[in-house]
Amino acid sequence: MSEQNGLACLVVDDEPRLRRVLVQLLESEGFRCREAGNGVEALRAMEADPAPLIISDLRMPEMDGATLLRHVIQRWPLTAVVMVSAVADVDTAVKCLHSGALDYVSKPFNLEEVRARVEQALQRRQLKLDLRSYQEQLEDRVRAQAGRIEELFLGGVQALAQALEAKDPYLRGHSLRVSEYAVAIARRVGLDASTIDTISLGGHLHDIGKIGVSEEVLHKPGKLTEQEYRHIMEHPVIGARILGPLLRDAPQVIAIVRSHHERMDGRGLPDGLKGDAIPPVAGIVSVADAFDAMTSERPYRHSLPVERALDELRAQRGIQWNPVAVDGFLGAFPDITRLPLVTPELSTAAEHG
């Protein structure tokens, strides 16, 4: 057996004489040994200072070796356990090997056999350690690769959003503002970080379906016909269809894209959802989207002053928009002069509105 340089070992046997024989052998090989008279004492010793190697008798009072083995494998799975058994207990020892022991020695034993069995058990333990290290490294690589894939995906998503804004100059900056307003609402109402991240991404992507809307309709300077309105309001369904294959693991983002034009009274689009049937995350983005739309120029109308837009949110609270989301917006921005994303032109309009 190679020199062990102070590796800790716990020797468990109810016969003090046999314990001493094993301890003397192991200490001569460089192990630091402790002793226990049964499984109960051994568990106490492990709880105080876990050992990487246990040599344990099978038959002991209070707690036998097989029961001790089960506890050790469950709590200290990287500890190497060598069972010591009488010839009559060989079948039990083999069962212990199936339960996680790395080797066993039969009584009466000779010291060379003990050396060989302990050496083999420690080699197997080292293989387990190496395998665990490899798995951890592999998991780190997988996580890093997943992060890279996510970065590439989000980059592609941002490119889609930028393509939409390039198609419609009136939407320039709209998705960013909606996302930041929605995040402010989410924080105000106390949502968790994961949900806030979902709302942020959903805000960026909520209008992505307008890529599939006719530019002639998007840029029409006058009032839309009913047919044109229906066409432009297809964008939530188009957006959900575009993002569906890309965001299978983010159904709440899809819900935002599809449902941000639903209304609390059930008169919204595309599904006519009502009240609590509307996903709360979509209700938050809906308020942020409506506020930014009202305070932004459009081909067919001028922007509203900020205070007028806020009055509209208050008036339609619980009718068109989720009341919690409206309250969250008003609470997040109690001072309209501090709205972080309002342009100077809109601030001036608010002052003179």
Image: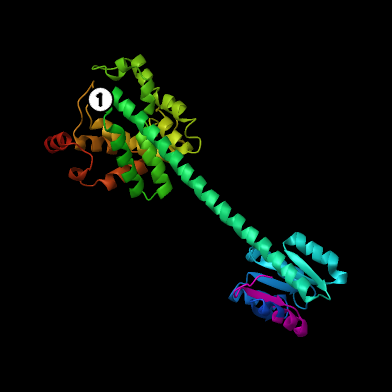
Q: Where does label 1 land, which residue?
A: 169
Amino acid carrying label 1: it is Pro
Q: Name which residue lies at 73% across and 83% down.
A: 20
111 up-or-down from 284: above or below: below
Residue 241: x percent and y percent? 46, 26
- Seen from the viewer's position, the closer of residues 349 and 36 is 36
Residue 103: x percent and y percent? 75, 65
Magenta stretch contains residue 3: yes
Residue 99: x percent and y percent? 74, 61
Q: Which residues are magenta?
A: 1-24
Residue 270 seen by the camera: no
**In the picture, residue 110 is in which quadrant?**
bottom right
324 up-or-down from 95: above or below: above
Residue 39: x percent and y percent? 71, 75
**In the picture, residue 4 is in which quadrant?**
bottom right
Disc 1 is placed on an element classified as helix
Magenta stretch contains residue 123: no
Residue 69 in the figure: left or right of residue 336? right
Residue 169 seen by the camera: yes
Residue 268 in the figure: left or right of residue 9? left
Q: Name which residue lies at 74% across and 73% down.
A: 56
Q: Name which residue lies at 75% across and 72% down.
A: 114
Q: Name which residue lies at 74% across and 81% down.
A: 19
Classify 10 Å Cα crowding around label 1: few (below 14), some (14-19), many (20 and above).
some
> Hey, which residue is sitting farthest front in the picture?
2
Residue 92 in the figure: left or right of residue 241? right
Q: Quadrant of the C terminus?
A: top left
